[in-house]
Amino acid sequence: MKKTFFFIFIFCAISLFNSNKLMAQEIKTNQNNKEKEEKLKPWTDIIKNNADPASWKWDKDEYSRFTIRGDWDGDGFDEMLYESATKLFSDNDAITPLELPGNLGVFFLINEGDLDGDGTDEISFMSVNRDYSNLNVIRVWTYTGNRWKELFQLPVHIWDCPNYNPKTPEESFTHQWKRKNKYSLNKVVLKKHDGIIDVIGINPDGRYAIEEIKIIRKIAAKRKWGMIIQPEED
């Protein structure tokens, strides 16, 4: 009888310990979820794609739509931004969609961060065009005054897209240059220093160069070409 009582006591003690442990874990989980919810708006409780840009697909089809997250309206909370065939739209219905040219979506969509220091994140993308040219345009946009506004654009080759798989020496040039100079291969806007944004574009003489762009009051101003980074061809 005593032995039976002893086993029952041990069983109850273990059950109580496990119950307290599960309760403590549940409280901790609820606290973490609450902290996460406080950082997000009610409509951003489902994150569909927070993968590193390095894992994005290049092949364009209905399964490679882009999704990014950022504070587009500068209210201190993050929203999502989704790509469709004809527009970029947020899960925050108060943010006006950005209409795209054509109906083929974009080759990439990146949160470039707050480029001009006004508290809102900027985006960059390259539209998919219905043509056979390897020339395209990288566009950088910001959300201001309840609408999207283009800060600047610059002509590039399609193979200058982040994560593009270069197939020829010509195509791999900018990728090799970025790697050699320790720039991110997944970013279009290269860096910011003293309010100047550096991007690689096609110089009017047809060669690659660093273009320096100063953003003033949501306008791209004081643009100039810096270092030529493509060797002269014979």
Image: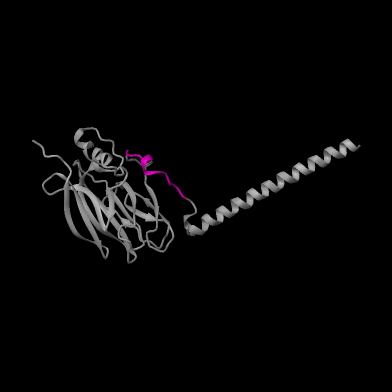
**Mark count:** 0
Please provide percent x and percent y for residue 73.
38, 62
Give the residue at x 66% y 50%. Answer: 24
Magenta region includes residue 54: yes
Instruction: Give the vertical position of 43 relative to 176 (above or below).
Output: below
| 11 is within the stretch colored magenta | no
Q: Residue at x 34, y 40 (%)?
A: 61
For the N terminus, the quadrant is top right
Which sits in the foreground, 5 or 128?
5
Q: How is the image coloured?
A: one colour
Residue 66 locus on image (x, y percent): 37, 47
User: Which of these two is toward me, 127 or 122?
Assistant: 122
Q: Is residue 43 left or right of residue 70?
A: right
Where residue 224 sits, quadrant-wise, is bottom left
Q: Which quadrant would the C terminus be assigned to in this image?
A: top left
Q: Residue 74 location, x and y as percent?
A: 38, 63
Residue in the picture at 33% in, 63% down = 118
Residue 72 in the figure: left or right of residue 135: right
* Span highlighted in magenta in the image: 47-58
Magenta segment's dominant SS is: loop
Residue closer to the observer: 29 or 183? 183
| Residue at far right of view | 1
Please name the residue shown 16% across and 52% down the image: 225
Q: Position of residue 68 (x, y in %)?
A: 39, 50
201 to 73, vertically: above or below: above
Q: Among all residues in the image, which is located at the extreme left?
A: 234
**Residue 138, above or below 218:** above
